[in-house]
Image (cartoon, helix red, strand yellow):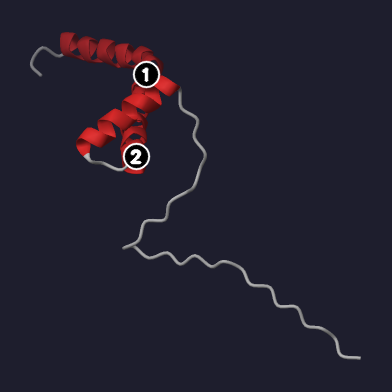
Amino acid sequence: MIDILKVYTFNIYLCDKTRIIMKILSLKLDDEIFDEAEEITTKLKLARNRYINEAVSVYNQYNKRKLLKKQLANESKLTSKDSLEILREFEKFIDENPAV
């Protein structure tokens, strides 16, 4: 008997720097938000997909800055005690050495 050879093919995605690979996703929007977006994209003559990509990009930048602000505030709290101690030492040094 002859064995049957099965051939499986897989999708291969090549990546080069000139091509942007996009993810496909399902998105549920509130009716009001969708209608407003449709109105704006029509007036701007912009594809809905491009509009949503740009909106998510802006929102990502906003949230990155918000997270950075929170991180900097936390790190500032952690270093404030040490900063005060160093400041006191400098003041003490200056008081003891007026010529400096």
In front here: 52 or 89?
Answer: 52
Q: Is residue 13 left or right of residue 18?
A: right
* Quadrant showing the C terminus: top left
Looking at the image, residue 28 sits to the left or right of residue 56; the answer is right
- Residue at horizontal 36 percent and vertical 36 percent from the top: 52
The quadrant holding residue 55 is top left
Identity of the amino acid at label 1? Thr
Return the x and y of residue 37 as percentages of the image width and height.
33, 29
Residue 33 x %, y %: 38, 23
Point 57% across, 66% down: residue: 11
Quarter location, residue 39: top left
Up/down of 95 relative to 5, above or below: above
Q: Is residue 25 above or below residue 28?
A: below
Expressed as whole percent of the image width and height from the top left, the position of residue 61 reads 32, 32
Q: For numbered disc 1, what is the local secondary structure?
A: helix
Residue 33 sits above or below residue 96 on the image? below
Q: Nearer the viewer, residue 44 or 100?
A: 44
Q: Amino acid at mark 2?
A: Arg
Q: Which residue is mark 2?
A: 48
Who is closer to the viewer here, 13 or 77? Answer: 13
Which mark, residue 79?
1
Question: Under tag 2, what secondary structure?
Answer: helix
